[in-house]
Image (tube, grey):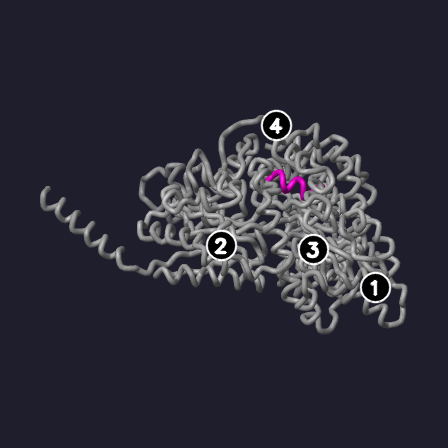
Amino acid sequence: MAGVSPFGSPTTVIRMNDGPTARPSRLFRNLNAKIASIPMILTALVVFVGGTVWTVVHSFTNSRLLPRLNFVGLDQYVRLWSAPRWLISIENLLIYGSLSLIFSLVIGFVLAALLDQKIRFEDTFRTIFLYPFALSFVVTGLVWQWLLNPDFGVQSVVRGLGWESFTFNPLYDKELVIYGILIAGLWQGTGLVMCLMLAGLRGIDEDIWKAARVDGIPIWKTYLFIVIPMMRPVFVTTLVIIASGIVRVYDLVVAQTSGGPALASEVPAKYVYDYMFAAQNLGQGFAASTMMLLTVAIIIVPWAYLEFGRRR
Amino acid sequence: MRYRSSRAALAAGAAFFMIAPAHATDLEVAHWWTSGGEAAAVAELAKAFDATGNKWVDAAIAGGGNTARPIMVSRITGGDPMGAFQFNHGRQAEELVAEGLMLDLTELATQEKWAEIVRPKSLLDSCTLDGRIYCAPVNIHSWQWLWLSNKAFEDAGVPVPTNWDEFVAAAPALEAAGKIPLAIGGQPWQATGTFNVLIPAIAGKDVFLKVYQDHDAEAAAGPEIAKVFKAADDARRMSAKSNVQDWNQATNLVITGQAGGQIMGDWAQGEFQVAGQVAGKDYTCLPGLGVNQLISTGGDAFYFPKLDDPEKTKAQLALASTMLDPKTQVAFNLKKGSVPVRGDVDLAAANDCMKKGLEILASGNIIPDTNQLNTEDTNNQLNDLFVEFFKTPSLTPEEAQKRFAEIIANAD
């Protein structure tokens, strides 16, 4: 991200303090950097913080098509948590989220470790694995809708090869549909995880490997107990990227199943959109998005406190 | 001072002269009519409007009302309104009107006596807020039709049913012949629509009005609606094998004789026409499911956002007037497969099913459309319930009715 660091480079600081006797005021230190970061600070305050506060406030109103400040207390939240569709959405997000987190980390790391064996055509493989990430979720969803379609996709191909009773039809089965979406999500996202992991592995000093080999430690143990703990920052970055992708999953579902069959593959972000716009009930949509924010905050805040608070 | 006022008068005069001869004004019109028959119908409106010396700028939004409405609303509330836009008859634009964002058409309506020519009256009522008129109704669509494939029943060796009960009784024979008795697409609104058609057919008009007009939760939880849920349970069993998404794919199952029938609005008729099928010979239509001969009066109306440019306002009024012109009404509605909103035009070209609809309309056995009675919020909640009901055999009719009554109790 092209954000501007609030601290200027050391050279800037020195030049700023060149004046003969002027005592530098705290406010004017790193003035260039401060001025340069004003647009970003304003954006963050107005768009992110302001928008969030506005949304939360309006979630306590009975706003319909247009936002109004007509407070109704917790009504929207009561309705939200008694709506079967919302409960299904939350359950789906939990299943999709936990599995997608585990599988993309494991598959991504294993692929990266395999690529790291100084194999031939590494560039080619890397491109192939990363390529799905260049596609949007909508395209991914459509492609996998066709692949998983029983009449054209995997099922019909295998049946055509002779296994007449082969059944693989996740998208039309209410119990399996969320796994059909998971497959598409993993196909799209694992390549990026692999690349991040590969970068992390390349950052490990060759000498560590040599030392481990001298000590006679098996390769899998070296990975598990030496390399992975050393890659902690890479894992944190990857986790944040995957998690943010999970919470906002929307277009994949819309393209692949539009929430069906029945409500079996609904997700929270889709509930928010449908109630805000199609149902013309902003209050209900805002309540749902506030709940999404709250869920993320409950997970992120204690973790961030442990992760970053300790170092001070 | 004097100089200035005379200049103003001069400018006003000039403006007057500029308007008086038909001055071409571009007017952007947004709608979601994108299928073949619909596009042909829109072309009739555009042609008639262009003939007034203005220019119709087409802004069609694909994907149906649920996709198009949010786009239109965000353009209007975002300060970039189009010249005119299509909504369904009913409460979808309620708040936009209340907020004062729509052009008041009352003067034009009084001048052209809309109150006398538009039938049924409920269409104009849906356009009215505090005695002022804010939209121009263009057509009437009704939901209460059962479309039956004569071929499917012939193959199954049973006579074509004449009402819902006979249809349910014929279902096992259809299944034995390898047919889907009832086709319902997977889109949520189709499930809700099917149920809403069953209410007046099974429980009658009064119960329908009690539930949807008065939002009477007791009636919604009562024994009459329980009967409707039982019928819906039958429909659920009969439609268990229909594996299509869009309504026209479901209609196609009926056209090709793979399915016995479909409950769908009169827009399905266009599909039969395009396929070259003849009413009475290839397919049968039963208004009110053959039980209770009534139709609802939904359909489309055009709204005109308030614009600053007086030229555009003039063009907007010209468009509203054109839409209700008798000639435009006939040309447009024949292509669209809907019924004109004027009772005084001649529809000799209408086919058998359409004539049945016109007769019922003339007899006055009509109900308002659910869009006129429910907010979009309530409709969406109903969609969530019924799409689940029709796809989940383990959800009992009793449990579903309880949830139905809750939604009605909270409706406004």
Spatial separation of the CA atoms under disc 4 and disc 1: 58 Å
Residue drawn at point x = 55 percent, y = 53 percent: B339
Secondary structure of residue under mark 1:
helix
Mark 3 or 4: in front is: 3
Q: Is residue B379 left or right of residue B320?
A: right
Which residue is painted at 56% across and 62% down in the image?
B349
Mark 2 lies on residue = B345
A238 with respect to A14 (left or right)? right
Q: Nearer the viewer, mark 4 or mark 1?
A: 1
* Labels 2 and 1: the sequence-earlier one: 1
Name the mark on residue B285: 3
* Badge 3 amino acid: Cys
Magenta stretch secondary structure, dominant: helix
**Which chain hosts label 2?**
B
> Range of the magenta residues?
B377-385
Q: What SS does tag 2 mark?
A: loop
Residue A74 marker: 4
Q: Position of residue B275 (x, y in %)?
A: 66, 67
**Mark linked to residue A239:** none
Q: Residue B155 has which mark?
A: 1
